[in-house]
Amino acid sequence: MSRKLSRNSRRVIVASLLGLTVAGGVLASAASLGINASTLGAGTTVIASCDTDGVSLKYGHTYVQTVPLVNPGSYRTSSVIVSGIAAACAGKAISVTLKDALGTSLVSATSATLTSPSTTLSFVAPYADAIAVV
């Protein structure tokens, strides 16, 4: 006895097979991204920190009299000193991004390689308005 599937049943089966094929392709491509503790790509993984007790930050400011047009005559955050970096972080890079209260990135800086327990990262002018940095 032969059983015929209704038109709607066939559509559901075809849609399900298509969905599984697409999902399999997405998972396979994500698996090939190569995420590890030294580099990041799109994906999820646990990245162990080389410094588990935290660091200290000290900001450097520059007085800007006329530029930029927004809030002239104010202090700008031009650098940050990161200290208390664990020896286990030697040879790694560090990146600092200053953000405002809304989480908007204001300015970023990266050091190439850490060689001591302290490093200074300088930002590119016109810097970030010091009062906006949180």
Image: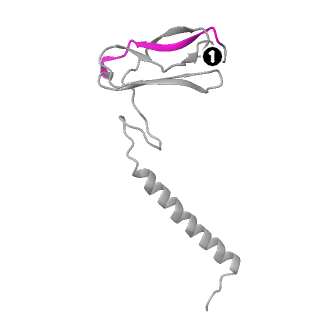
Neighbours of disc 1 within 10 Å: few (<14), some (14-19), many (20+): some
- Point out residue 62 in the picture as x, y percentages from the top left corner: 52, 9
- Point out residue 97 in the picture as x, y percentages from the top left corner: 51, 24
Say if residue 134 shows up in the picture: no
- Point out residue 133 in the picture as x, y percentages from the top left corner: 59, 16
Left or right, 76 with respect to 32, comes to: right
Magenta region, residue range:
72-88
Residue 16 in which image quadrant: bottom right
Foreground pick, 38 / 6:
38
Q: Secondary structure at mark 1?
A: loop
Q: Is residue 36 above or below residue 88?
A: below
What residue does disc 1 label?
132
Q: Residue at x 47, y 19 (%)?
A: 123
Left or right, 46 with respect to 61, comes to: left
Magenta span includes 93: no
Q: Residue at x 40, y 20 (%)?
A: 52
Amino acid carrying mark 1 in the image: Ala
Say if residue 64 shows up in the picture: yes
Q: Residue at x 37, y 46 (%)?
A: 34
Q: Is residue 22 above or below residue 117?
A: below
Q: Residue at x 47, y 55 (%)?
A: 27
Magenta span includes 77: yes
